[in-house]
Amino acid sequence: RKEVEQDPGPFNVPEGATVAFNCTYSNSASQSFFWYRQDCRKEPKLLMSVYSSGNEDGRFTAQLNRASQYISLLIRDSKLSDSATYLCVDARRGYQKVTFGIGTKLQVIP
Amino acid sequence: EAGVTQFPSHSVIEKGQTVTLRCDPISGHDNLYWYRRVMGKEIKFLLHFVKESKQDESGMPNNRFLAERTGGTYSTLKVQPAELEDSGVYFCASSQEATSSYNSPLHFGNGTRLTVT
């Protein structure tokens, strides 16, 4: 089983829609998670951290479910510019051995 | 501030040749990392420098890969001799702290797309 698993998609959603991605992790000791965004042929960029209490940043909400060992990313009112690949990251061992998911591809269509 | 820069952006070489990738981290970042993404796979950790010292190189695939960070500034990753399976995107990243936190995120370079034919 992979340490971090994501549905690679693609998720095709219309503008204005709400979309959610899940990411499961295998190590129950993991506590440090992030969502990164990667545009086509670009570098990954930090989108947001995932706090155990859940956190929101504008249209984006991240949540952590320890019991089921998954994290989620919710995007409301999708914009065309949200089209990208969203990487789930487990950084429990620090950046030295950060574990990436394969990424979920989102395509927002007009 | 200038971000993490990598050179070259693309490299196409033949099997058996040598290629050297360069990474300039954000100024002042002691922690420098190399990662690799092979097509269709996850981004994988290769190694970690703290200043000029290799802190962890457990992700390096084999001894055909050699990374250096002389003077604790820029870093190079040399592949010699290159094999077909070395093709992929090589990312460099830097951070102020090695401990993951939102206040000290990983900053990635644009990556070097390596194709070995």
Image (tube, rainbow, N blue to C red):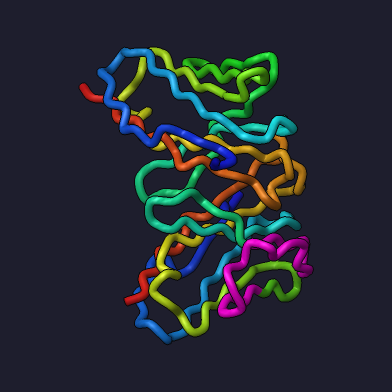
In the rendered structure, which segment of residues is drawn in magenta?
B47-67
Question: Which of the image's four quarters has the N terminus of chain A?
Answer: top right
Above/below status of A110 relative to B99? above
**Up-down: is B110 above or below A89?**
below
Does residue B102 appear in the picture of this structure? no
Question: Residue at (62%, 24%) from the top-left corner?
Answer: A69
Residue B72 x %, y %: 74, 68
Residue A9 visible, this orientation: yes
Q: Would you say residue B55 sits in the magenta stretch?
A: yes
From the viewer's perspective, tell me whether residue B45 is left or right of residue B110. Answer: right
Asked whether, in this view, residue B75 is left or right of residue A42, the answer is right
Question: Residue B11: percent from the left, percent from the top?
Answer: 38, 72
Quadrant in the picture for residue A38: top left
Q: Residue furthest front?
A: A1
Q: In this rendering, is residue B58 above or below B2?
A: below
Tell me the quarter of the picture where residue B75 sits: bottom right
Q: Quadrant of the C terminus of chain A?
A: top left
Q: Report the residue at 44% width, 60% height from top.
A: B89
